[in-house]
Amino acid sequence: MNQSSSDVSKNHEQISLKTPFALAFLWLLLLARAQPAIASPPIPSPEPAAAGTILSAVKISDAAGGFSAGELENGDNFGHRVAPIGDIDGDGVPDVAVQAINDDDGAANVGAMYILFMQRNGTVKHF
């Protein structure tokens, strides 16, 4: 069946409006770092994972991964932008800034930035 460009455009708009792109979660991947070379280890140990290997994945949402804000909604776009911000609380674990571009808890779709203080296992300690 041939469709005119206006029909295709109309169908594309309908699909776009119904597709849930604005979810309220993100996946945090914990990756292996490059290991420094050791001349001869005193005790045999398992071979370390290659740098960049995914060691584990943690879902972070208002119901998973230790982030219990309880105020995220699908349209908030939690995880729209994620940035490493170093170890803010000094516990030796890098922390993360996460944007929820359409969060509307303060006013309609003004957005929010969450600072997530992380644990070694990839879950949120507090925010």
Image (cartoon, rainbow, N blue to C red):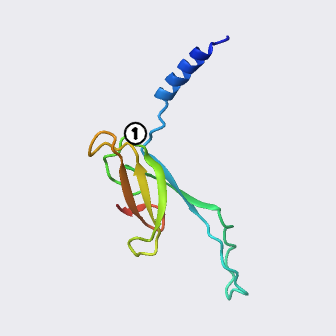
Residue at the farthest front position:
6
Residue at the farthest right position:
39
Q: Quadrant of the N terminus?
A: top right
The residue at which mark 1 appears reads as 74
Label 1 residue SS: helix
Q: Compared with residue 57, is residue 1 higher up or lower down, i.e. above or below?
A: above
Image x and y of residue 101, in percent: 40, 45
Q: How many marks?
A: 1
What's the residue at 44%, 41% (across, down)?
23
In which quadrant of the rendered view does residue 34 lie? bottom right
Dot 1, how many residues are within 10 Å of its Cα: few (below 14), some (14-19), or many (20+)? Answer: some
Residue at the farthest left position:
106
Depth order, front residue of 29/11: 11
What's the residue at 69%, 82% (across, down)?
44
What's the residue at 69%, 86% (across, down)?
41
What's the residue at 47%, 51% (across, down)?
81
Name the side, left or right, on which 51 lies relative to 67. Answer: right
Depth order, front residue of 58/21: 21
Image x and y of residue 71, in percent: 31, 46
Name the side, left or right, on which 85 lies relative to 62. Answer: right
Q: Compared with residue 110, is residue 59 higher up or lower down, i.e. above or below?
A: below
Residue flagged by tag 1: what amino acid is it? Asn
Image x and y of residue 5, in percent: 61, 16
Q: Quadrant of the C terminus?
A: bottom left
Image x and y of residue 60, in percent: 44, 53
